[in-house]
Image: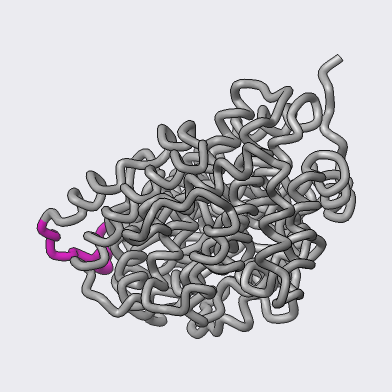
Amino acid sequence: MKPQLPITKGVDYWTKRISDQEMPALCSTIRDLEKLAKDDVSSLASLGRSVMHDNALTTRILRVANSATYNKGTSHVSTVSRAAVMLGFDTIRNICITAKLLTSLLESHNLSESVYQRLIKLMAHSFQAAMISRLMLKDYDEALREEVFIAALLYRIGESAFWSIGGHTVEPLDQALQQCDSLTAEKAIVREQLGTSFNQLTLNIARAWGLGDVLTTSLSHPDERMPEIRSIYLSNQITDALAQEHVDVDSLNDLLVSAAEIQGVSLAQYKHLLSRCADATVKLAEAYGAKVLVNYLPETAAIIKNLDEPEQPAVYRETDLITLLKKLRELTEHAIKKADFNQVVQTTLDGILEGVGVDRCAVMLLSPNRKLLSPRIVIGDGAERFKQQLLVEMSGSQNPFLDCIETKQSEWVQTLKSHQLGYLQGEYDFNQLAHGFIIAPIVVNNKVIGLFYADKHSSERNFTQQDFDSVNHLTQLANLCFGLTVS
């Protein structure tokens, strides 16, 4: 019989299991370091004594302390005590945590090849994000830079720790995720099978282990504008963008512009700094004895070089009444011939995109338990990013997606404020919806199964009443087709 993943254990179960059974050494080390941090007088000496019995950890600390990242031309450091005096307690503490984390995960046993690859990619992502976030705050206090580095490194500790468990506990989920075609679908499966999200698991671990306010705030309020929180969010977004098989040039450039603003440099300067940071990331990974991560780091310098190709002038879709009429006629024919669901959906989306003249449109479907809504078919500008990142929770008193489903009425959402967007899950950039959107119900057997969605985000244009009426006309005719198909 095929092993099954424990269903809906919940965040407390997984936090306790990871802390007590899977990664007790790392958990213990972090808690011990937090205790030492409260003793200003003897913390450095105590730290030196606490790692002396661990030869592997001592070796890693010294290699890292002598790396180009930390040793700025001073003499070679040969003892942990000297490294602690030279770099300070906070830096050495974070080096200890990083070394222990990498050791705990890299030495995970009982992993299938697929799970191992997933874990190593995740670790490489986290390590690169940590270096990028540190770079963004290069003109800030060193203690803050170190705190941001460790927070970015541990930003996905819940997910990493889960995969490191290995065996029949994680393999069914790994196999299920391989069948998913979007990040939103993956998140829905994780939530259903674990009883929590990886983000919530990381947040719970951060609180249980005392990993600091910077990490917990970056997880619970990722849209905070504080430089340290913004840098952690952006570093993860940049790393995600760099790792894509087909890099979305526009999206990556937007992220780099935001990162350059935090650092107070031009975009060209930031690209140069990011390329140098990529080289430093490789060298530091090797100093930590984590050379295996290097093969999973993206070719950052080559990707950035490709971004410098001259931009083509933007061309935006305008309303095309001939195309709109053509698609309405096609939908009428679909109704007569009782065309299948996919034919009706494709014609409707084509009508919205090319006829109404929007930048992007989608079909969003409800999960089986009707608690989550995610894009399944997306066409137009930034389609893949939208499909991979947007996930809507069916809750909240000011949730237009939920209102549209419950009332079976189209909604034209014109203004949005970030504090009202608690129903948006995952790492979606709230600014993607800033110029409003139109949604309309998809009704099959008198039951709403999802929504049609349209926006003009790329061109930053506003909808008109005519746009709303045209989308309404198309979607109502589509619902008529669905009703005739199943009748």
The answer to whether residue 111 is left or right of residue 268 is: right
Say above or below: 472 vs 465.
above
Say above or below: 4 vs 371.
above
* Residue drawn where x is 71% and y is 57% of the image: 202
* Magenta region, residue range: 310-325
- Residue 484 position by quadrant: top right
Residue 13: in magenta span: no
Residue at the top extreme of this rendering: 1
Q: Nearer the viewer, residue 278 or 118?
A: 278
* Residue drawn where x is 37% and y is 39% of the image: 245
The answer to whether residue 483 is left or right of residue 260 is: right
Instruction: Please state the total of marks drawn on the protein image.
Output: 0
- Give the x, y percent position of residue 243: 40, 44
Quarter of the figure that contains the N terminus? top right
* Residue drawn where x is 34% and y is 75% of the image: 263
- Give the x, y percent position of residue 284: 43, 47
- Give the x, y percent position of residue 280: 35, 50
- Residue 463 position by quadrant: bottom left
* Residue drawn where x is 75% and y is 67% of the image: 36
The answer to whether residue 338 is seen in the rendering is no
Quarter of the figure that contains the C terminus? top right
The answer to whether residue 331 is seen in the rendering is yes
- Residue 244 position by quadrant: top left
Chief SS of the magenta region: loop
Q: Nearer the viewer, residue 214 or 411?
A: 214
